[in-house]
């Protein structure tokens, strides 16, 4: 009977120990699964980084090859040149449109009296009030033209307009022929003398 009770004790102990061991095995297995999943995530991340590093190394090698080519720093693709040519054509078209607008505006100004074409009718030189019968220059009689200043006129624009008509005159020539004339304060309606070339 003693043997049976010993065996019963052993069976009781084994029965109570088996669920404990099974519970420990399940917890250990769960931890092992978790660790395996984390290891797999790390391996995937390392594989992605290896791909990125390989791609960057390839790009660096390509750039080094381009730099080692003759004229590598001045390299431009056919597409770059095509885009540049198109931009230049657009700028030139815009320049031509602006030029036409400027010419139209100048024509309107010419018609409104703000800027008139110079009167190229020959006129006698201005008289020197101190010596009647002589011109204001010491070199003798001077041929030229009278111009009436209009709003918006400048001496450089007036000289340019006369040069366009074939009269070679500069701003300095106009100032010498009109003593006391202030180029920064031109009075509208005042007549000035434009000397003709000698």
Image (cartoon, rainbow, N blue to C red):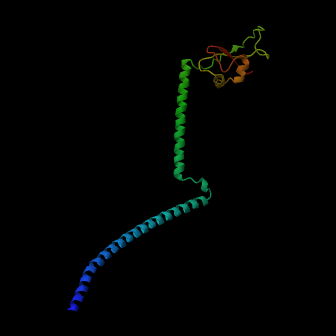
Residue at horizontal 54 percent and vertical 49 percent from the top? 81
**Quadrant of the rendered image containing residue 168:** top right
Residue 5 image point, x, y percent: 22, 88
Residue 187 image point, x, y percent: 63, 15
For the N terminus, which image quadrant?
Answer: bottom left
Residue at horizontal 36 percent and vertical 73 percent from the top? 32
Above or below, 11 relative to 175: below
Which of 115/121 is in front?
115
Above or below, 95 relative to 106: below
Left or right side of 142 for 26? left
Q: Inspect this view and state whether residue 169 appears.
A: no
Q: Inspect this view and state whether residue 101 appears.
A: yes
**Quadrant of the rendered image containing residue 183:** top right
Which of 144/106 is in front?
106
Residue 90 image point, x, y percent: 51, 40
Residue 41 image point, x, y percent: 40, 67
**Quadrant of the rendered image containing residue 164:** top right
């Amino acid at each position: 009977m003693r043997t049976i009770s010993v065996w019963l004790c052993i069976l009781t102990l084994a029965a109570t120990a088996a669920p404990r061991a099974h519970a420990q095995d399940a917890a250990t297995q769960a931890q092992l699964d978790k660790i395996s999943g984390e290891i797999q995530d790390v391996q995937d991340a390392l594989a992605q980084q290896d791909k990125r590093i390989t791609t960057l190394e390839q790009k660096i090698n390509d750039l080094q090859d381009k730099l080692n080519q003759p004229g590598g720093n001045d390299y431009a693709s056919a597409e770059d040149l095509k885009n540049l040519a198109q931009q230049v054509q657009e700028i030139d078209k815009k320049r031509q449109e602006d030029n036409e607008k400027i010419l139209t505006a100048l024509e309107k100004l010419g018609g409104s009296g703000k800027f008139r074409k110079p009167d190229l009718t020959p006129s006698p030189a201005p008289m020197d009030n101190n010596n009647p019968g002589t011109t204001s220059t010491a070199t003798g009689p001077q041929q030229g033209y009278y111009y009436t200043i209009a709003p918006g006129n400048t001496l450089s624009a007036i000289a340019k307009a006369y040069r366009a008509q074939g009269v070679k005159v500069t701003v300095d020539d106009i100032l010498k022929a009109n003593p006391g004339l202030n180029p920064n304060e031109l009075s509208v309606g005042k007549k000035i003398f434009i000397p003709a070339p000698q």
